Amino acid sequence: MTASASIDYLKNLKNKILSYTEVDEELLNHWLRYYKRIDVKKGDTLISPGQMVEHFYYVAKGCIYYYKLEEGEQKVLEFYTEDIFFTDLPAYVKETPSDYYLRASENTVVYAILKTDGENSFKKSHQLERFGRLSMQEAFMKIFTRVERLSNRTNEERYLRLLEKRPDLLQRVPQYLIASYLGLTPVGLSKIRKRISISQ
Amino acid sequence: MTASASIDYLKNLKNKILSYTEVDEELLNHWLRYYKRIDVKKGDTLISPGQMVEHFYYVAKGCIYYYKLEEGEQKVLEFYTEDIFFTDLPAYVKETPSDYYLRASENTVVYAILKTDGENSFKKSHQLERFGRLSMQEAFMKIFTRVERLSNRTNEERYLRLLEKRPDLLQRVPQYLIASYLGLTPVGLSKIRKRISISQ
DNA sequence: GAAACTTATTAAACCAGTTTAATAAAATAA
DNA sequence: TTATTTTATTAAACTGGTTTAATAAGTTTC
């Protein structure tokens, strides 16, 4: 990866923050220096169960999936792709060891800031505190949408909805992870796909 | 309801805010005046579908349940009881008409602050902005726990877990709402309860 | 305290998913 | 290109819930 590409990623990160709220140029540039680039190869983990989660992350490129092992089975909670913030929020907030994996499903570039640095930026700047609040609000809205879908739709509808909303996901992520995300077995999803293809 | 009881509720609200972060006494007292008391009788709604959600609420006493009508059926997302903040966050945040009901399952007292007033308090005070961030974080953690449970446990386990975590709920709320909260029909929950009582 | 209404249980038929296992197809490595 | 591994499909038996409907138990209300 070239240095110029790296600079572009930081520009995206900067614009992302500015999309939440106004932040003074100087101040933002100062705190952006705390973000460190991490390259995560396909299949590598950023976080595994038992680890402490000390960073807040931004996906510059690629895809990280967030899952848990439950009786030996992957239960996927979320896929994080380009230009979004993520972390294992429960472990990050409570400062307890993680129960989750954060793993790259393709070669991925993330930027990471230490919790202590992030918290300091919030303490020192009302503007960044505001960014913190609004990004937390966005995280809430995202997971809320998921709860709504999980509890209100049939599996078939939820699959079709996912196809519509995040068509890229089905190209870049194996189907068994999609199945897990929808709360199904790979076999179950396969049956649903067949049912759909027949009924058209 | 007497005036002295009313004052106690405001004290609880004040302590609740202070439990998130330090706030200057004067400032907090000032903004607390924007909270207006609302008495909601059992069965009455605070919000119905189609309405705009202009307030952020605090439960002083009683229980509000948050649900949606999906093909004529109640789908309960959450129960809000004493000393917690709530609102229909998606509608509140997006400023679009609500898809949900907020209804009292018993005689309830809430305190409500207008969104514009709340936002102003955040804008004017870094401390209150911080409170806003941390309460949003708490809302996230709460819904996250729900997703975790919904996607990872059997219905029977989830019912037993609820019994353990919120034993009061099963006393104060009808069983068909609990069933809905767990994503079951009343019949389904009844079968689970029978299965449990037999196996002991 | 009887009548009306609401809530909870039970039974029986049904169904969308699971589990297990075999096979096929696709991707990766040699 | 072939061999190996990973991923997706299919089939068959099974299961935990649903739906519908009847009944029973609890609550309100008058």
Image (spheres, coloured by chain):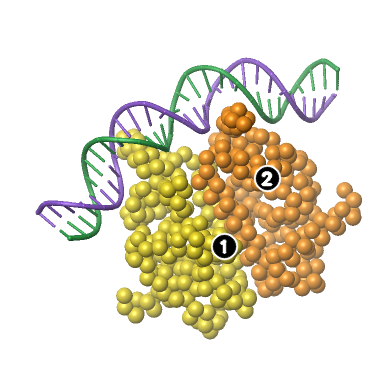
Chain colours: A yellow, B orange, C green, D purple
Task: Identify which amino acid the numbered label 2 is placed on.
Answer: Arg
Give the residue displayed 31% in from the left and 78% down from the top: A2
| Foreground pick, D10 / A61 | D10
Residue B107 in the image: above or below residue B141: above
Calculate the distance from the C-alpha at mark 1 to the C-alpha at mark 2.
23 Å
Q: Which mark is residue A96?
A: 1
Q: Position of residue B150 (x, y in %)?
A: 54, 45
Mark 1 falls on what kind of element? loop
Q: Chain of mark 2?
A: B
Hey, which residue is sitting farthest front in the picture? B200
Horizontal side of residue B18 vs A23, given as left or right: right
Horizontal side of residue A62 vs A13, given as left or right: left
| Foreground pick, B114 / A145 | A145
Q: Position of residue B53 (x, y in %)?
A: 65, 53
Q: Which mark is residue B166?
A: 2
Task: Identify which amino acid the numbered label 1 is placed on.
Answer: Thr
Q: Position of residue A82 (x, y in %)?
A: 41, 64
Q: Are marks 1 and 2 in contact (CB under 8 Å)?
A: no
Give the residue displayed 45% in from the left and 63% down from the top: A47
> Is there any visible trace of residue B123 in the rendered image?
yes
